[in-house]
Amino acid sequence: MKEVQFREAVAEAMSEEMRLDDNIFLMGEEVAEYNGAYKASKGMLDEFGSKRVIDTPISEGGFSGIGVGAAMNGLRPIIEFMTFNFSLVAIDQIINNAAKMKQMSGGQFNIPIVFRGPTGSAGQLAATHSQSFDSWYANCPGLKVVVPSNPYDAKGLLKSSIRDNNPVIFMESEQMYGDKGFIPEEEYLIPIGVANIIQEGSDVTIVSYGKMMNMIKDAALELKKENINPELIDLRSLRPLDYDTIINSVKKTNRLIIVEESWPLGSISSEISYKIQQEAFDYLDAPIQRICAEDTPMAYSKTLVEAFLPNKEKVIKKVKKVIYI
């Protein structure tokens, strides 16, 4: 095992796959000369050259469309958005072309493309640079949506995403690029659509994904001091969603809390709550609780940012609510 930063795990995944397949290339703003806005493509231009690591103009709709066309013609593009907030400029290419082309062509075209970059809040970046569109993309048939929470998962899931013949939305976090973790020296893959039980427990199931997992781990440590033993599930991918792991956990703990950085309406927590009440309602000893971002655009003020986002105190309060109901 070796210790790497999250950004290094991303760069390793892309580089390893590009060494294996000449059809893979990386395209996006500042991915080449600048080594990536968050240094997640450091050294790749030197190794692979300007034909495979390509700096683009500030034109997300344009270079996303180039990526979709390249995928239709047998290449395997990785399209980096400097932030998924900017993917809204390219959403027509993602939703109406990448996600639908296989069906609309009667199976004649696979679209093996990865759209990747940071998602969610990264501090005081205000309303238009702090949004989580995880549930938006997960709502669209034809896409796969992956949100890793640590360097190990980032590398294994990104390699699987690059090899997938379907379009994959791969969402990272600006606030996690410097996070460190251990990964194997040898090659490994993590299958898309399989959640990870990162801590087994008996009192309550807490489900989340992405950078929220670090906060939930901290909350779990506080809860253990009060003899509350939560089971923690990292979804890792939002489409496909691993319902079975959640259902089986709820059947054991009889309580469920879902935490996500997205807004509450039409959220991943809404979908999971519906599925549990359909498949495991009789096992619940308390109403399902969820913690989402507040239902408003995020402000710039540090105090309001802290109030807007899920946090450890909110998780602990919800856990006690379902246990001591």
Image (cartoon, rainbow, N blue to C red):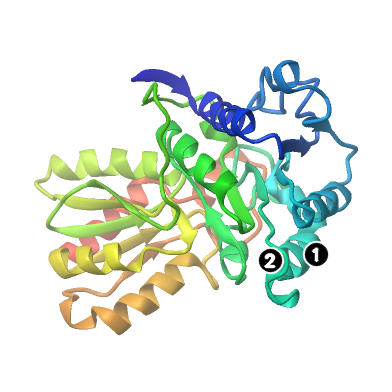
Task: Answer with the quarter of the image where residue 88 lies.
Answer: bottom right
Q: In the rendered view, does 188 fall on the left or right side of 87? A: left
Residue at the spot 37% in from the left edge and 55% down from the top edge: 194
- CA–CA distance in space, label 1 to label 2: 10 Å
Q: Quadrant of the N terminus?
A: top left
Q: In the rendered view, does 108 fall on the left or right side of 141? A: right
Q: Amino acid at mark 1?
A: Asp
Is residue 68 positioned above or below 100 on the image?
above
- Whether residue 166 appears in this view of the structure is yes
Q: In the rendered view, does 196 fall on the left or right side of 150? A: left
**Circle 2 residues within 10 Å: few <14, some 14–19, many ≥20:** many
The disc, 1 or 2, on the residue closer to the chain's N-terminal end is 1
Residue situated in front as seen by the camera: 50 or 136: 50
Instruction: Please provide percent x and percent y for residue 114.
Output: 65, 48
Residue bearing the label numbered 2 = 99
Residue at the spot 46% in from the left edge and 26% down from the top edge: 179
Is residue 157 positioned above or below 206 on the image?
above
- Whether residue 304 appears in this view of the structure is no
Q: Amino acid at mark 2?
A: Ala
SS for dot 1: helix
Cβ atoms at labels 1 and 2 below 8 Å apart: no
Q: Quadrant of the C terminus?
A: bottom left
Residue at the spot 12% in from the left edge and 45% down from the top edge: 226
Is residue 176 positioned above or below 84 on the image?
above
Q: In front: mark 1 or mark 2?
A: 2
Instruction: Please provide percent x and percent y for residue 2.
Output: 38, 18
Q: So how many labels did they put on this image? A: 2
**Circle 1 residues within 10 Å: few <14, some 14–19, many ≥20:** some
Task: Answer with the quarter of the image where residue 22 lies.
Answer: top right
Residue bearing the label numbered 1 = 92
